[in-house]
Structures are given as C-alpha cells and as structure tokens.
Image (cartoon, coloured by chain):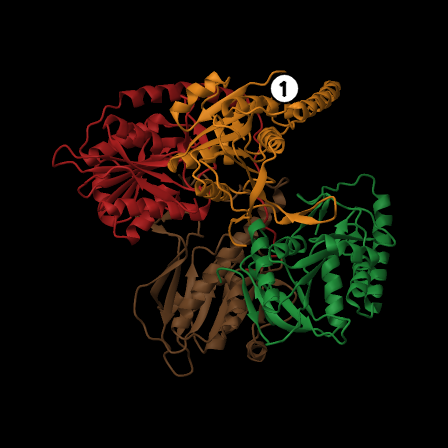
Chain colours: A green, B brown, C orange, D red
Amino acid sequence: MMETEVIIEREIRLDKPILIEGLPGLGLVGKIAAEHMLTELNAERFGTLYSPHFPPQVIIEDDGVVRMMRNEFYYWTAENENQHDLIFIVGDHQGQTPDSHYELVGKILDVSQMYNTKMIYTLGGYGTGRLPRHPKVFGAVNDKSLIKPLKEAGVSFEKTGGAIVGAAGLLLGQGKLRGIKGACLMGETHGQIIDARSAKAVLEILCKLLNLSIDLTKLEKKAKETEKMLEKAMKAEQQQQQIMKPLPIGEGPTYIR
Amino acid sequence: MMETEVIIEREIRLDKPILIEGLPGLGLVGKIAAEHMLTELNAERFGTLYSPHFPPQVIIEDDGVVRMMRNEFYYWTAENENQHDLIFIVGDHQGQTPDSHYELVGKILDVSQMYNTKMIYTLGGYGTGRLPRHPKVFGAVNDKSLIKPLKEAGVSFEKTGGAIVGAAGLLLGQGKLRGIKGACLMGETHGQIIDARSAKAVLEILCKLLNLSIDLTKLEKKAKETEKMLEKAMKAEQQQQQIMKPLPIGEGPTYIR
Amino acid sequence: MMETEVIIEREIRLDKPILIEGLPGLGLVGKIAAEHMLTELNAERFGTLYSPHFPPQVIIEDDGVVRMMRNEFYYWTAENENQHDLIFIVGDHQGQTPDSHYELVGKILDVSQMYNTKMIYTLGGYGTGRLPRHPKVFGAVNDKSLIKPLKEAGVSFEKTGGAIVGAAGLLLGQGKLRGIKGACLMGETHGQIIDARSAKAVLEILCKLLNLSIDLTKLEKKAKETEKMLEKAMKAEQQQQQIMKPLPIGEGPTYIR
Amino acid sequence: MMETEVIIEREIRLDKPILIEGLPGLGLVGKIAAEHMLTELNAERFGTLYSPHFPPQVIIEDDGVVRMMRNEFYYWTAENENQHDLIFIVGDHQGQTPDSHYELVGKILDVSQMYNTKMIYTLGGYGTGRLPRHPKVFGAVNDKSLIKPLKEAGVSFEKTGGAIVGAAGLLLGQGKLRGIKGACLMGETHGQIIDARSAKAVLEILCKLLNLSIDLTKLEKKAKETEKMLEKAMKAEQQQQQIMKPLPIGEGPTYIR
C-alpha cells in the first residue's frame, strides 16, 4: 500500500448527505460524540479507509482476530423531511505527519462528494485546562452564513484567533475550496482527560441543528464515570506537592483538535 | 533506487505455497525460527528485495566483500501430499518509517501472489518482561476459521487487545484485504534479549501445523547458550549498583562513513 | 491534497514584473517589510498557494470564520516608466521539511515565470544577537552585476560565508538555474525579537532600488513600540542573574532567514 | 524541484572512466583526498547535481554571490595507457534521510553509466577513536577479484563485519547490482576530527592503484596543522573529569514485532 485507499463496501444512495466527522482528537470529544450518535441511529458502515500513514500495526481484537488500523464511513437515511441523510467518518487514527493529514482529508472529501455532500459538521474538543460543570460548545465555520443558525442553537463564537488542528479543521478549509460549507463544534474540555460530558454537550447542539432526537442516557452514564474518576484524580493531585506537567509539544491551550 | 524493488533470480513453480515470515523483531524470535527452518530444509533463495527504506549502508562480510541491506525470498517444495510448498521471507531489516512498513509488506504480498499463496504464517515474539522456562506460543489470526486448528496445535489465544507491529501484523491485515488467510505465532519472550528458546517453541508448533519434522538440535544448543548468558547477565546485574544504558542506535565505533 | 497547489484567482497582465518575497523568517523582518509595502501600494491579490507541507490546521479569524494556512500572491502595476510591475509572495509559513522548501520555491518560480519575471528581491533578517539603533542592510546576490547598484543604494556586502536558509535563499539559487537574477536584502536584527525597525531599514533601500516612494509612518510607529518593548525586556533581563538562552535548533547566529 | 537533478554542463568523451567518490563523511577523509586529487590533476567540472534532500539553503561566497548546495562531477583524461580516465563526485552534502541516500547514489550511478564506468573507488574514513601516527587504509570491495590487487597496494582487510554508511557504501552495493565493480578505501581516523593525515594515507594507495603521481605537499602541510590542533585538544580533554553520554530514545518492551 503506497497511499491512502478507500474501499466502498456497499452501494448506497443518499440525498445531499451531511458529513459528520468524529476522529480522535482532544479529550476524544468528537470521537465519543460521533460514535454515540451513529450507534443510537443504527447507522451502517459502507466504506473503510486504510492508510500507510496510520501506525504500521494491527490490533488483536477480543476473539483473537486482527484488524488493520482504519477509518470507517457510516451512513444514515433521514426519517422525515426535516432531517438530512448523514455520512459519518470515525476511526482509530488521524495522520501522523503534516502532509498525511492533508492526504487523508482529501480522500474523505472525495468520498463525501461522490454522494453530493454540501455540508460538514466536524466535532472536537477545545482545551481550556479547566473542567467546567457545564461545558460550553465553541464554533468555527467556513462560511459566514452559518454563524447565525449556530448561535441560535447555543454555540458560542467567543474563541477566535486559535487554530483547529487535524481533520476537524482541514475538512472545513479544504471543503471550502471545493464549495462545501462546514462548521466545527468544539466542546469545552480539560485537554488531558477523556471527556464524555463535553461530548454530550456537543451532541445536544448537533441534534438540535439536525432535527434529531437521540437517547443520551449511555453518554450521561459515561460522563458520570468521568466525573468520579476526575474527583479522585483531583484529590490525589491536591496531595502532591509539586506537579511536573509539561504539555505535549505543539499542543498549548490554544490548539484545538 | 526510488522505491522498494524485488529481483526474482530464479524461475520456480510452486503449488499454492504457504508464506512464512521471519523478519527481525522482538527477541529476534521470528528471525531465528524462520532462518533455522529454511536452513534445515535446505530451502533455496529465489529472490531478493532491496529498499530505500532500509538503512543507507552496506555490510562488510567476513571475506571483505560488501552486500546491500536486503530481505530474501527462499522456497521449499513439499516432499509428500500432507505438506505444502513454502516461501520464506527473511532478512536484515524491516521498514524504518510507518509508511515504509506498508510499502514493504505490499511488495512481499505481490511476490507471494505471483505463486498463488493462500496462507501466511508470520513468526514473532510476544514481550512479557519475564523469562519463562517453557515459553508459551500466543496466536492471532486474520480469519476465525484458523483459531481451532491453532489451538489444537497448542497455540494460546489468551493475549488479545494488543497490537502486532510491523510485517508480522501487516501481512495478516493487508493479506486479508487480498483474500489471503494468515496467522501470527508469537513466542513468549523477555523482549530485550535474543531468545532462541522462544524461537524453538514457535518452531515446534509451526512444524506440527505444516506436517514437517525438523531437527531442532542446533536451536536447542543456541537456547542453552542463551540460558547461560542470561544467568551470567542476571548475576552481573545483581552486582552492579549503577546500570549503564546502551549508546544510541547507529553510533557505535564500528560505523564507517 | 497531495502536493503544493496554486490557485490563480484573477487574470492579470504584467510587464516583466519583479518578484518580492516576504515570507516569515528571522525577526519577521521580510514579512513585515513586504506586507507593509503591499498594503501601502494597495497591491491586489491574484493567487493563493496551499501546501500539504504547511501545518495541518486552519486559523479561526476574528469573525469566527476559518481559513487554510497559505501563501498569497499580490501584484502592483507600475505608475511611471521608472518603475517596474511587482509581484509579492507573502504568507503564513514556509515549508516544514528540507524538501518542501525546494518544492514551494519551485512553485513560486513557476508562477513568477508565467508573467515573465526576470528579477527577484527576497527580504529577510540577519541575526547578530545585538539590537542596533541603526540596523544595517546586508546583501547577497545570485549575479555579480547586481552588487554595484546595491552598494550604491546603501547595501553592505561585509557578511559572507554564511547561509541563507529557506525561500529567501532558495529563490536566488533556484532562480539562477532558471535565468532569473536576484538579490537578498537582510536587515540586521537581534534574531529572537519581531523587528519592525529592521524591516523599515530594508524597505528604505528597496524603495530606492525600485524608484518607489512609500509612506513608512505606520512602520515607524511599530518600530517605536518594538523599541519600548525591548527596553522593558532589557531592564527585566538585567535583573535576572542567570540567563537561560537555548538557541533554536539549527539556527546558530550564522543562519539567516 | 521535486527530486534530485543533474545538469551536464559540458559534452565530454571518456573511455571507461573510473568513478572516484569523495563526499563528506567521517573525518572528511574522503572529501579531502578526492578534492586534493582533482585539484592537483586540474580535473574539470562537467556536471552539477542539485537535490531537494540537501539543506534548504544557499551559501554566500566571498564575493557576496550565493550558490546552491550541490554535488559536482569532475573529469580527467588519462595521460598514458597505464592510466584510466577518471570521474570525480565531490560536494557539500550527502542525503539527509535514509531514502535520499539511495536516490542520490542512483543518480550518481546513472551519470557514471552514461560514460560506461566499470569501476568505482569510494574514499572514506574508518573511525577507531584513536589517532594513529601512521594511519592504515582498510578496504572493502563488491567483488572478490579486487582483494588481491588492493592487498598488494597496501590495503588492509582486517576490518570486517562493520557497515559502510552513505554513498561510500551504497555506490558499491548498488553498483554491483548494475554490474560495476568497486572498492572502498577507508583511512584509519579518530572519527571526530577533520583528518588530512588519514586522507594522505588513502591518496597514496589510490595513486598506486591508478598509476598516478600526485604532489602531496599541501596535504602534508594540512596534516601537520591537524596534528598541532589535536595535541591541544587532547591536553584539554585530559583535564575534563566526567563524560556525559546520551540515552537512546523510544524502545519500550510493550511492542510486539
């Protein structure tokens, strides 16, 4: 395998589907949100993306059978005329090098355009180093016309000037060059903790925007587990005297994934 | 040389050969096992793989003649109808970067498919940080149907959830995409020691699976040497107060520029 | 996106334009100078360069709208016969790897040659670790015939033997191979401070060379702000006892950007 | 520039020339030897090699004129029938990454084969950490038939089992695949010092092999300067007490291969 490949496993017909991206990023907020959504909607897989830019390894699953590192395409068909057909892109990894991010995002857009996608929502976390009880959802768009409806759905536009790193950002940037509108929804999150609570906040707003009603019970349960884990961690931290906490390179609090 | 090249040096005919991979990896378990096997079987070389992704150097062999870094293809023809023709891939190195692993594995599969290979065994080590007297052999497969016969041959499937890095894993993953079944046999090993004992454990099971009978005397001898070396090393370690850690790779005094 | 792409957004006609490069480098001297110049001249954008070798991210601008990392081409048409048509290349980033520098510079030259460019000025800083009140402007050329007119305009040629890293250097080197003359103007600068004063020194000489008269008031204001900031910083530094001063990797004082 | 390019600047005719490689390497032994030789022979340049794998910079030469990083091809025509026509490859740099070494060596061989080269001498240093008063010259070949004449010329074949890194090694390895014989002459050297004395030892043997007589006076002068510098350095070293040695990066026991 010399470059990124997509295998379309099922012939499907979709009507201008909206692409929803939930690849791994800060706090796994986007991944948790998108995967919860597609599970609750019983979305079905129609394609798989393999890339030489993923780690060169296979995962041994619980039954002893291995599988390649991958991203997966799922789809869901609208149930009424207030809804839109959806495509999801989720998976194990993003690119490991700068140029592989661009290559992977290009391939994801190629697939989306095969089905005439005109709109993208990318989901991610916005790291603040704090753990808010009620995480805000910050927005960024690739077209001004999207700001008003997002604000009405509760999205905050107070965070500007930063950068959105990886697929969540590049899908909007490269999408615009291809005439596809897009918005990024970023749940406020600590940045170094897997954060189901932030994912829930993102999903509530996304459901509003898409006229969808999704059961969030399982996400709430996960969020409560996160909460307990955090309380423990914070107590332990208070007992420590000196905290050594060098942030990973290139991931200061202004970077969003 | 701009990409990986394979030179086929001998025209051969094989009947659905099984590919056996023994490239360098953890404890050199797979390399020792595969190289012992092909030596004992008098397998012959039919191809050589060169790659710009191997270290940019040549090795000075004992007679003062240099040779390129390489992987080598060997073949062996079944002696009775209970056996299978075999292809071996062994050599100096695996890829040095993520994407070169994918490229190299693709080339190995290309060659295997030229001879209509339908089954792969990849050999490797499974690092546990311990030195068992009787190393287990752990398995992973790319097709559920392979689990039963492997278990019957003594392979353990208790280790799941991990990752198999490099050719041993990718040959199964990419092989599956090409319709080739495959299993990885991983000998339990310490992880930081060259381990002939673990290689012997792997080979005993592989011979059972392939209806082969191979003389393991030399491997047993090596295993005993390993054992002695280890006992010495462990005693020495106990006596040391402060441990000297090895020099960075590729900077010994034996390197010439 | 698999390689660097240029989108020409406007059809323009230019008469042997001079290319002026002001991409980010040491002290941002070249960037500040070129961007001030094109603003004052009301130069207009006619093309955008995107590259998978830029950081894989988008910037959230003040209105909440994102944009890709990019370089931009501007043009300006001569107002009298003593002047030359101009093309500017400015932007967020240079390449992140050695070979991407070569690729990007090749693309910039491709665009310049579309309009029959025969001359290039690249702008940059020359780090000396000191903060001169009256920064000199050092020169380097890709053709001996350029030295005399540059000296007459006040450029110093006392700094030789060093290297010019990045686009400022490669545009001259690769340009020469394509038959394009070029000079690099390097403003003396500290090296670790954004330096508008040095940019002003460079611009004064460039205007003389191009028979242009440009309002430098805003640049002077910026320069004064720099000055104040520096005085503060220097006082603070004097109060420190021990100075931690790790140089950026690969950027000793002989490297110029 | 997207890949390595060679510009042939002069049409020449050569009769099965021998290629002599002296690119930068350990102790700059090969570079000093080859450059001294071509200067003394008044060899002339006929080609230049540029590569995006060289550092992305230009050098400012003494007259203020810049030049690209490059390798250069020189040629010399035999003066009697006991001699051979010669091609030299010398220059600023070798590749910076593993695969770029392979690409560059491939290009050098392409040029050599244009002139029907059948033999290569690569020149380098062999690091021993010691500073011998009379450096030996170690040899390695890509064809057994070369050992006898080299031994007769005074080359030692006692060092085997090591690796020859970079062009000096790959030219022999890749050359062999193209049917070109080759030998590497390695002057014994300390490894961290520019060593003209070792270069002189290499050159004496090479001249014998090529039936050439070259004035080594300037090299002897350089060698004496090296000697003085070394004596100083060794005294300084004796005064140091503790040597800091770096740890290797990134090799945990949890990876399975």
**Total number of numbered labels?**
1
Q: Nearer the viewer, residue D189 or A122?
A: A122
Q: Residue at x 45, y 22 (%)?
A: C160
Q: Position of residue C47 (x, y in %)?
A: 55, 45
Residue B211: image quadrant is bottom left
Considering only vertical position in the picture, is D39 above or below A162? above
Q: Which residue is mark 1?
A: C131
Can residue A251 be seen in the rendering of this structure? yes
Residue at the limit of the structure toward the left, as seen here: D81
Residue at the limit of the structure toward the bottom, as seen here: B81
Considering only vertical position in the picture, is B101 above or below B238? below
Q: In what element is the residue under mark 1?
A: loop
Residue at the limit of the structure toward the front, as seen here: C80
Q: Quadrant of the C terminus of chain B?
A: top left
Q: Residue at x 30, y 46 (%)?
A: D109
Residue A63: image quadrant is bottom right
Q: Position of residue A150 (x, y in %)?
A: 79, 57
Q: Position of residue D230 (x, y in %)?
A: 43, 22
Q: Mark 1: which amino acid?
A: Leu
Q: Nearer the viewer, residue B58 or B139?
A: B58
What chain is tagged by disc 1?
Answer: C
Q: Residue at x 63, y 28 (%)?
A: C192
Can residue B64 be seen in the rendering of this structure? no
Residue D90: image quadrant is top left
Considering only vertical position in the picture, is D145 above or below A214? above
Q: Position of residue B2 (x, y in %)?
A: 40, 52
Q: Is residue D179 left or right of residue B105?
A: left
- Report crowding for label 1: few under 14, some 14 to 19, many 20 or more residues within 10 A (C-alpha): some
Q: Residue at x 51, y 28 (%)?
A: C80
Q: Is residue B97 left or right of residue A223?
A: left
